[in-house]
Image (cartoon, rainbow, N blue to C red):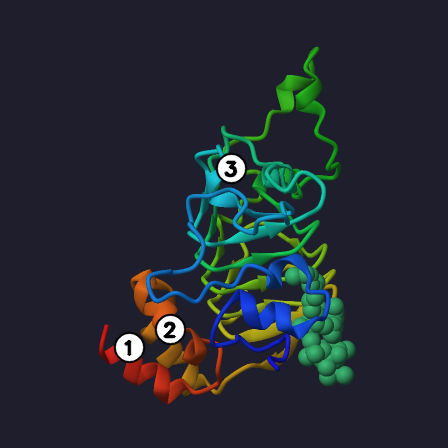
Amino acid sequence: MARRNELPDTGWELIKADALPAPPYFQRYTLAEHMHGPNPETKHPMEGFPQVCFIKNTVRNPNIVIGDYTYYDDPEDPENFERNVLYHFPFIGDKLVIGKFCAIARGVKFIMNGANHKLSGVSTYPFQIFGNGWEKVIPAPGDLPFKGDTIVGHDVWIGYESLIMPGVKIGNGAIVASRSVVVSDVEPYTMVGGNPATLIKRRFDAEIVDKLNAIAWWNWPIEKITEHLKIIVSGDVEALRECAATI
Ligand SMILES: CC(C)(COP(=O)(O)OP(=O)(O)OC[C@H]1O[C@@H](n2cnc3c(N)ncnc32)[C@H](O)[C@@H]1OP(=O)(O)O)[C@@H](O)C(=O)NCCC(=O)NCCS
């Protein structure tokens, strides 16, 4: 009998024979050779489980760029991921860029550069936004803190209700623990957590991280990703390198 956390060799029959009630995301296996995972152009790739959304298909803001297969999981309006990108004003022009195959949990928020008030004076109160004579203290260009674009790499997992501050860069393969406040850059293949988020652990040695970044499996054709999926989710980096050589 197939264990529920292992892919069976065939699809429906084995799952049914398992006789355990399977959550919806385990019920749709079909391991036909010609299949290569979900359609990245669909909004809700898991039938019967609409809270998971491939958000590149719902985001409309041109300053938010999302890669294929990156999903946002939220039982409340998962299509409206943009509501979690805060203080993101077009006149500032900063971008949120998220790579491919990222998993973004419910309530993750990105604070963008428009959130910042002038810090260099005595008062941080934004008098100018109220006009009526107060516009005389409109900050000059460069007066407001600007931390640049927020960049999230590929294969990044961002835990429940984490907060990502402006200009943060999160490397490929990183994990952000739930409810973290990420105020500084996160190195690839590290796990960070807390407020402010600090290193919990390095997932791989630096030399392996270089190899993984060079392999960049997320850029392979989807047929190759599907073919080598078991190795991608294993810890066998050498086997992954051998696969990469055939791409
Ligand atoms: C980060 C995470 C993956 C770590 O998993 P793990 O390695 O099995 O966790 P452990 O319980 O062994 O904790 C490892 C260390 O991380 C710390 N840690 C775990 N979660 C943390 C959090 N949210 N914030 C700060 N530190 C955290 C632990 O205190 C522990 O520290 P220590 O080594 O100093 O004792 C997990 O805690 C987490 O946050 N997962 C995200 C879950 C989520 O939000 N899912 C949403 C649906 S996709």
At a point 46% along the width and 38% down the height, the residue shown is 63
Rendered view: 119 above or below 163: above
Taking the image in four quarters, ligand 1 sits in the one at: bottom right
Q: Nearer the viewer, mark 3 or mark 2?
A: 3
> Label 3 is placed on what type of residue?
Thr
- Could you say which quadrant of the image residue 120 lies in? top right
Rounded to the nearest angstrom, the CA distance separating label 3 from label 2 is 28 Å
Which disc, if any, is residue 58? Answer: 3
Picture coordinates of residue 165, whole percent (x, y): 62, 52
Q: Secondary structure at mark 1?
A: helix
Residue furthest to the top:
132
The relative height of residue 74 versus residue 83 in the rendered view (above or below) is below
Q: Quadrant of residue 191?
A: bottom right
Q: Residues within 10 Å of mark 3 (few under 14, many from 20)?
A: some
Q: Which three-letter amino acid code belongs to the residue tagged 1?
A: Ala
- Residue type of the residue flagged with mark 2: Asn
- Residue at 67% in and 43% down: 119
Residue at mark 1: 244
Tell me, for residue 213, which label it has, or none.
Answer: 2
Q: Nearer the viewer, residue 49 or 217?
A: 49
Give the mark nearer the N terminus: 2 vs 1.
2
Mark 3 or mark 2: whose residue is earlier in sequence: 3
Horizontal and vertical percent for residue 152?
50, 57
Q: Is residue 166 above or below residue 26?
A: above
Q: Quadrant of the N terminus?
A: bottom right
| Residue at disc 2, secondary structure | helix
As measured in the structure, the alpha-carbon distance from the residue carrying label 2 to the one carrying label 1 is 12 Å
Mark toward the start of the polypeptide (1 vs 3):
3
- Asked whether disc 3 touches disc 2, contact meaning CB atoms under 8 Å apart, the reply is no
